[in-house]
Amino acid sequence: MNPVIAIVGRPNVGKSTFFNKVAGRKIAITENRPGVTRDRITASCEWRGKPFTLIDTGGIELKSEDVMWKQIALQAQLAVETADVILFFTDAKEGLTASDYDVADFLRRSKKPVVLVVNKVDEYSQEKLFEFYALGLGEPFGVSAEHSRGIGDALDQAVEYFPAGETIEEDSLKIAVVGKPNAGKSSLVNQLLGEERSIVTDIAGTTRDAVDTRFERNGKAYTIIDTAGIRRKRSVNDDVEYYSVLRAFDAIKRADVVLLVVDALEGITEQDVKIIGMVHDEGKPSVIVMNKWDAVEKDTHTIEKFEAKLKENLKFMDYFKSVYISAKTGQRVEKILSLAEEVYAHASFRIPTGALNDLLLDAVRVSEPPSYLGKRMKLYYASQVSVRPPLFALQVNDETLLHFSYERYLENVIRGAYDFTGTPIRIQVRSKKEKE
């Protein structure tokens, strides 16, 4: 998973300005008064080819008795616990303060790598930085976040502290297991691994982090990524759980295949739909795993009813692949790995260019695009430019003439001719000027 850098320090030292500069957009609210940033704010960033998650925090006033400042400090402390590297911000114009010493002592106790950043050094001079050696945190890096000076040096040092982590062999298929809390994700992981690797309880939210486990089955290598349950946003009250959800999102991004575990007793819910929608938007092949199937009262039409409900709720991804299991008893769990292999193969499939052009040009002849203001879209050429997810580029006379309903028609034509079950596909149009 991506390393995490947390920006901490007392109020009004320029943490949010730095965050916005590195994130490349104005996410954090910056205002010249303390207490503006109260909640943790995160962004996915990259430096020197190394991706990471950057967390902005509110200013830490460790000795304040004010309720608001105590809550801000608690959230900042949780950010430190989650982080791999800390950027400790101070202010060159104000110089060292008692609060800086308090924060420095706290960071030393965390045992995390710390990069000492002295902000607001508008005209670099060694004299302005010298006093900050007294904090005992090593060499201070002088920066001006507002003017984007010195930021690269601080980040260079930060990425040097990134953990190497365990190397996961590239030959393994990475499978993320996601879903709401208490849907049975950890029980499923344990069944797949054949061991009690994840803690399993009936209390929602037991798994706090994304955990990778590599194993082999039938001569094939897999890496299972077990994640914390993803709650509705208004339900994320526990500060620690905030970071668990952050790790789950990261797990989806780096997975090859995603298993969405749904509680069959509860049925597919709005939150399940939102989670699978996120998987769809990331372009990941997926399998919907209806768990606790052993506890569902059934008749001869039960599966058909569940499938109809899935089709109703997942109209945006009618390509879904589903399986009905019991992680508790092991019923049909053995099918999951083969299904993961299947949808990954579909996501990796490439249609030959000649066959794709024949298919789509025939489709256009059968059903012409609708005209707009007397103009009609013409398809000149099609090619599949990438896989995982499959991406098809269409060269047309005017890309603005492709209505979403006709794009859906072309997608259905492609899916009708080739099996892309379980994976999203993308269609991209490019205009080509007609010869006069």
Image (tube, rainbow, N blue to C red):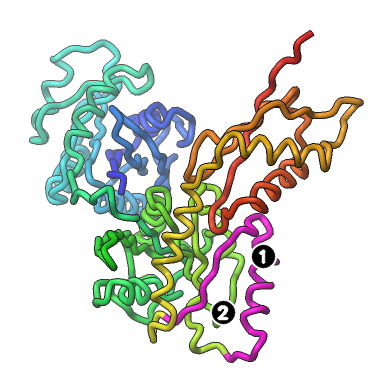
Quadrant for residue 430, please give it.
Answer: top right
Residue annotated with mark 1: 313
As rendered, which of 286 and 184 lies closer to the eye?
286
Residue 256 x/y as whole percent: 40, 52
Residue 414 among magenta residues: no
Report the residue at 82% width, 36% height from top: 369
Q: Nearer the viewer, residue 274 or 353?
A: 353
Q: Which residues are magenta?
A: 297-326
Q: Secondary structure at mark 1?
A: helix
| SS at badge 2 | loop
Residue flagged by tag 1: what amino acid is it? Answer: Asn
Towards the viewer: 114 or 188: 188
- In the rendered image of this protein, does residue 306 appear above or below residue 155? below
Q: Is residue 306 above or below residue 167?
A: below
Identity of the residue drawn at 43% across and 56% down:
257
Kind of residue at disc 2: Glu
Image position of 434 (left or right of 375)? left
Q: Earlier in the sequence, mark 1 or mark 2?
A: 2
Q: Nearer the viewer, mark 1 or mark 2?
A: 1
Q: Which residue is mark 2?
A: 266
Local packing at callout 2 (Cα closer than 10 Å; few below 14, some 14-19, many 20+) is few
Residue at x 72% of width, y 46% of height: 408
Left-right relation of 160 to 37? left
Q: Is residue 324 magenta?
A: yes
Residue at the (54%, 69%) spot, across then down = 322
Q: Residue 359, which numbered label?
A: none
Residue 222 x/y as whole percent: 30, 60
Frontmost residue, 109 versus 181: 181
Q: How many marks?
A: 2
